[in-house]
């Protein structure tokens, strides 16, 4: 159980920097998500921490120990990939026993630890199955059990739920969060899914083109993004002009609609019913082509496409963002 | 697409059968002739006997050639498997400058006309004093077999998710432990196929062997020499035995790869 610290970590391939001077400190027991689009360097960063790749410059510390030059074998890290990466020729139990065998833990003790880990991910009873006989969700649980059975110092998860369908993904998100909290293991999770990042993380690190854009708690990153990239990557972003000529972000759910009263007149271009919410695309009178998006819980009065509405928001819900 | 209409489909089938017949007719002639009772090579055989098999197994020079062929094939196929296996692992998993030329170099013996490889080996082995030696023969066959190993194992390694190895390392397993406990058990069917291909490749080889073997006789080299000296039906018996051996070995490969579900990937 340890904290992670990155100091000026850079990885270059020729002139291209996959990771560019990245600093990060993850506290003991914390779950931090590295969020970014594909090609942002998030997987590179994870592979540097795992020791599968060496940084061009910078230092990596796990539990205060400088592991920059240590091979993957000596880092005591639990690693989980999107593709599960189970050993196909071994049973579920043998997969989970693998790291214990490497560590020369006695047969009885190893067996007890492995069965406990499988119970933790609710796979007891499937010990003798082969990976090919399991569903995607079950395979990912095996990978998780294998990654935590030897009490690793830290846990690294690379798009762990990316290959699963939506419903299963949401279930496993909750399980993963509970498992991480009960083990108290410092965790770094890589994802391109902003919802996953918002729902799982203690803090989010947003990455673009190898550079850190912001490191913040989910609510802060969502409502007070450091720049326009973070604002747009974390969800739907409306930008409104400020009196000083600058721009400010206002999130869709902070926008109020009314049939009459104060506010700016607008026309509903599109009303999209999403179950829990209705999303309105609005065209403000006398303003640019880019429609404003509002989201409202589907309880009160609803507006139809083409209807005229009044749009307003609180000044407190505006967050200035550089252009 | 070809084969969409009944007409083109029939034409394609006919062409396929013709090609197959063209390839198998020699077998249909050689195999019956090996069981002939006649003194000379005649077809169809006037009567049946096993005398040419007796002549083969009773001839110490044939048996010696057989022993040479078998030992060269056994040693060179294993050497090619180890060296080619390590090379192709590096080629598939590594990321280094000059990977393309390196792969081209390993594959060259399969692509360059054999006669050129033969002359190169003749000159090269003469220079290091291995021409006409058993070791020289093993070295030459190893070089010839490496491309077969690279081809078969290259596909298998590419198909095997590298992240499985990376996870094993992260779990604390050394490179050799990962190789032994994770990679090789999963590649075993392809390793077996590569070894069989290399073994047959060596057992069948005649061009390079003729150039460099000196006093050593392998079975194909002796067959070739016998044909020039005198037309003796014994070689039809040898040919039949070689065909049987090759068919059985390839059947074993097909069976093992088929069971592992890898037949199509390796052959296509």
Image (cartoon, grey):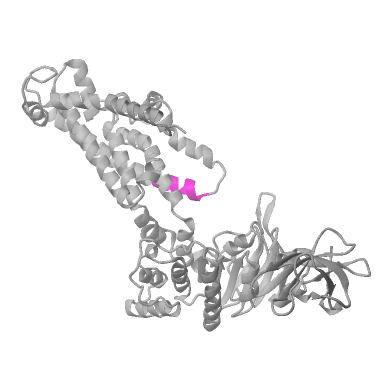
User: Which quarter of the picture shows residue A254?
Assistant: bottom right
Q: Nearer the viewer, residue A126 or B1?
A: B1
User: Which quarter of the picture shows residue A184?
Assistant: bottom right
Residue A67 pos. (x, y %): 58, 68
State the residue lying farthest toward the bottom: A182
**Which secondary structure class fits the magenta region best?**
helix
State the residue lying farthest toward the right: A244
- Write the start and end of the magenta stretch as one range: B85-94
| Residue sitting at x 88%, y 74% | A263
Residue B116 pos. (x, y %): 41, 24
| Residue sitting at x 21%, y 24% | B223
Above or below B54: residue B161: below
Q: Nearer the viewer, residue B106 or B20?
A: B20
Residue A105 pos. (x, y %): 38, 76
User: Which quarter of the picture shows residue A128?
Assistant: bottom left
Q: Nearer the viewer, residue B47 or B4?
A: B4
Report the label total. Answer: 0
Q: Nearer the viewer, residue A309 or A280?
A: A309
Q: Is residue A71 left or right of residue B113?
A: right
Magenta-span inclusion, residue A8: no
Which quadrant holds the C terminus of chain A? bottom right
Magenta-span inclusion, residue B88: yes
Which quadrant holds the N terminus of chain A? bottom right
| Residue B90 visible, this angle | yes
Q: Is residue B62 left or right of residue A152?
A: left
Residue B254 pos. (x, y %): 29, 44
| Residue A217 visible, this angle | no
Q: Is residue B209 left or right of residue A273?
A: left
């Amino acid at each position: 159980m340890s904290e992670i610290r990155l100091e000026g970590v850079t990885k270059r391939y020729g002139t291209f920097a996959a990771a560019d001077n990245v600093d990060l400190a993850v506290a003991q027991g914390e779950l931090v998500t590295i969020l970014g689009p594909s090609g942002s360097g998030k997987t590179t960063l994870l592979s540097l921490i795992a020791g599968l790749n060496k940084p061009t410059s910078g230092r990596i510390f796990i539990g205060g120990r400088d592991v920059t030059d240590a091979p993957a074998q000596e880092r005591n890290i639990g690693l989980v990939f999107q593709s599960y990466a189970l050993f196909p020729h071994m049973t579920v139990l043998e997969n989970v026993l693998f790291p214990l065998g490497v560590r020369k833990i006695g047969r009885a003790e190893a067996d007890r630890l492995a069965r406990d880990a499988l119970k933790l991910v609710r796979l007891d009873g499937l010990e003798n199955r082969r990976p090919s006989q399991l569903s995607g969700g079950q395979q990912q649980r095996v990978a998780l059990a294998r990654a935590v059975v030897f009490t690793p110092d830290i846990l690294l998860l690379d798009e762990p739920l990316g290959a699963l369908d939506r419903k299963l993904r949401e279930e496993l998100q909750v399980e993963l969060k509970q498992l991480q909290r009960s083990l108290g293991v410092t965790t770094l999770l890589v994802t391109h899914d902003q919802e996953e990042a918002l729902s799982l993380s203690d803090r989010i690190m947003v990455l673009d083109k190898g550079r850190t854009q912001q490191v913040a708690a989910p609510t802060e990153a969502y409502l007070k993004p450091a720049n326009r990239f973070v604002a747009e990557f974390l969800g739907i972003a409306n930008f409104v002009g400020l009196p000083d000529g600058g721009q400010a972000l206002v999130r869709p759910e902070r926008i109020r609609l009314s049939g009459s009263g104060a506010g700016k007149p607008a026309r509903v271009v599109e009303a999209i019913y999403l179950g829990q919410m209705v999303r309105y695309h609005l065209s403000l009178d006398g303003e640019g082509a880019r429609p404003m998006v509002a989201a409202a819980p589907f309880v009160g009065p609803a507006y139809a496409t083409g209807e005229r509405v009044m749009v307003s928001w609180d000044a407190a819900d505006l967050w200035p963002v550089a252009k | 697409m070809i084969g969409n209409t009944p007409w083109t489909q029939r034409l394609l089938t006919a062409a396929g059968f013709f090609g197959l017949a063209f390839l198998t007719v020699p077998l249909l002639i050689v195999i019956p002739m090996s069981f002939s009772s006649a003194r000379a090579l005649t077809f169809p055989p006037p009567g049946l006997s096993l005398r040419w098999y007796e002549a083969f197994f009773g001839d110490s020079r044939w048996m010696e050639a057989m022993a040479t062929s078998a030992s060269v094939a056994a040693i060179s196929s294993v050497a090619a498997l180890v060296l080619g296996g390590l090379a192709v692992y590096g080629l598939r998993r590594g990321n280094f400058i000059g990977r393309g030329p390196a792969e081209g170099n390993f594959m060259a013996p399969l692509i360059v006309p054999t006669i050129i490889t033969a002359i190169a080996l003749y000159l090269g082995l003469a220079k290091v004093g291995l021409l006409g030696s058993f070791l020289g023969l093993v070295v030459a066959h190893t070089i010839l077999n490496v491309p077969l190993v690279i081809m078969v194992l290259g596909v298998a390694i590419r198909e095997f998710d590298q992240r499985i190895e990376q996870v094993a390392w992260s779990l604390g397993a050394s490179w050799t432990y990962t190789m032994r406990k994770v990679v090789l058990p999963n590649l075993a069917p392809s390793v077996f196929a590569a070894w069989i291909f290399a073994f047959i490749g060596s057992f069948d080889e005649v061009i390079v062997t003729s150039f460099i073997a000196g006093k050593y006789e392998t079975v194909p080299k002796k067959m070739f020499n016998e044909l020039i000296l005198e037309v003796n039906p014994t070689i039809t018996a040898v040919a039949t035995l070689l065909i049987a051996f090759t068919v059985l070995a390839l059947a074993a490969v097909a069976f093992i790869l088929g069971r592992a579900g890898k037949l199509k990937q390796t052959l296509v």
